[in-house]
Image: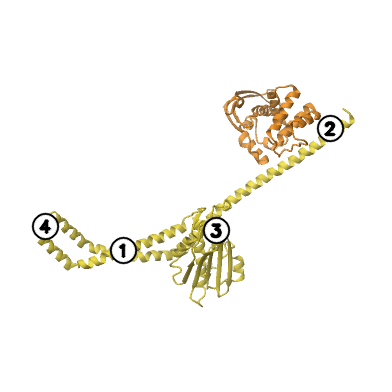
Chain colours: A yellow, B orange
Amino acid sequence: MSKAGYNFEKAYLREKAAKDELECLLEDKTRALFNANQALEEKIELLQNQQAVLMQTEKMATLGTLSAGVAHEINNPLAYVTSNLESISYLKPTLVTLLQLAQKQISQSISEQEVVEAITKLDSALSLELILEDLDELLDDTHEGLKRISAIVTNLLSFARPKNNLMAMSDVTESLDSAIKLLTNQLKNSKVECIKEGLPLTYCNLSAINQLFVNLLLNAKYACDLTTEQYPHIIVKLFADTEHIYIEIVDNGCGMNDETMNRIFEPFYTTKPVGQGTGMGMAIVYSIIKEHKGDIYIESSIQQGSLIRCSLPILTEPDSNL
Amino acid sequence: MKGVIFRGLESLVIEKCGMAVWDTLLEKNAPEDRVYISVQSYPDDELVGLAQYVAVALQLPIAEVLKAFGEYLFGYLLPRHSTIIAKFDGFVSLIMSIDSVIHSEVAKLYQEPNLPKIRCKVIEDGLILMHYYSSRKLCLCAEGLIYGAAAHYNMTVTLKHIECMHKGADECAIEVRFKQVIV
């Protein structure tokens, strides 16, 4: 081999060694990057699971605060359903006797005269006309009372059940209606005004939006409770433009200072006394809004009240990034 | 096919036949100014073309060239991926973990979507049945890699291709008989 050829090969081998070293370095870095990415993905999954658990825990805590009111809501119809059933039980012997007379009449085991005498006796003991008047009302009221209890339980269950990632084309108004029903007792001493425009359907998680309404309404109610200067007034507005659905909740409560405004979405930050709040309510509202690719805007003045406006983009098709 | 395989072939050809032969091979079978980089992908046809030309240059059947290349490739990859090989305590452990360990490590580095699928079963002491599937049908190269692995662990190995994709089978079945070399 010529000297020029020898030098050329030596140079090639040196360059090849450099290339090998660089490739090894690249592979080491790629492997490290892959492992780091995998660890990150595991952490994200863990965080997502923890967030779901946290949301459910906060729901359960909210249910704790709602329980007394819900019990009262159930107790009210339960009282008159029980009373109506007692009244129906009182009427039962008369009704049974009438049915037995009818059976005997059909089988001709009793004379017409005896039937008339027996009915007259029953009528004098308990006015048959009164029974006829009362029976429909008793049954209708009982039915209505049971329907109310059923609706309360349905709302309670729909709030409590974990329904993560149940996204569907839905009307946000349903979530508001459900939240208002669930909070009937909590809000009974406040003037609650709902101004609802017809909203377009959007791809959303109704259960999560329901939780958003419950949290915002409970906060508004709490703010109103802290001021005695005016009668509690909460206005809920639902409206939309071509691209967004807006949820606005305005209260005339105590308002928030700058520190609370700055920390409002901070997990575990609460202005409530120890043991009364988890500090997760607004953090969860924020995560629900972000989950729906929306935004939240807050205005507040001390002793005048607060306005919370959430805007959710109207999604007509499932967004794979949600 | 990933560049690391081409680089292995380049190394083999230069070592056995010299740089001039490799340059000629490239000129005839690859686009002008082709440079192979391990992490990049290149057309499978280029590798087949290069291997065929090596067979002509060495006056050997292509099957022999692929086997020889596979055996050489194991030695070429060994120093580059010694940490992976260190995970195995011997020949059997390596062969049994090709899919679960080696290919998952390869996927980390190269994001290779066309890795062969390999299933292995120990039939008896000294005999493993390997099933090989790849759309590239490089089973002979796989045989060479097995020979390379056996040499690394100081084993003698006999391979019997009882079913082959080149003969119409859905996947290749290779009997791997091995025993420790007694020094």
Task: Tell me the element at label 2.
Answer: helix
Task: Name the chain letter of the residue that bears numbered label 2.
Answer: A
Say which label, 4 or 2, has the lower sequence index: 2
Residue at label 3?
A314
State how far apart marks 3 and 1 are (Cα).
Answer: 42 Å
Q: Which sits earlier in the primary sequence, circle 1 or circle 4?
A: 4
Callout 1: chain: A
Q: Which mark is drawn over residue A140?
A: 1
Contact? badges 4 and 3 (CB < 8 Å): no
Screen quadrant of the N terminus of chain B: top right
State whether residue B129 appears in this view: no
> Marks 4/3: CA distance?
74 Å
Closest to the observer, A315 or B75? A315
Structural distance between the alpha carbons of marks 1 and 2: 102 Å
| Amino acid at pointer 4 | Ile
- Which residue in the protein does label 4 denote? A110
Question: Residue B126: x percent and y percent?
Answer: 61, 25
Q: Which dot marks residue A38?
A: none
The residue under label 2 is A9
Q: Chain of mark 4?
A: A
Q: Earlier in the sequence, mark 3 or mark 1?
A: 1
Amino acid under disc 1:
Asp
Give the x, y percent position of residue A30: 69, 43
Can residue A106 be seen here?
yes
Mark 3 or mark 4, which is nearer the start of the sequence? 4
Above or below residue A114? Residue B154 is above
Viewer-side label of 2, 3 = 3
Q: From the image, which quarter does the C terminus of chain B lie in?
A: top right
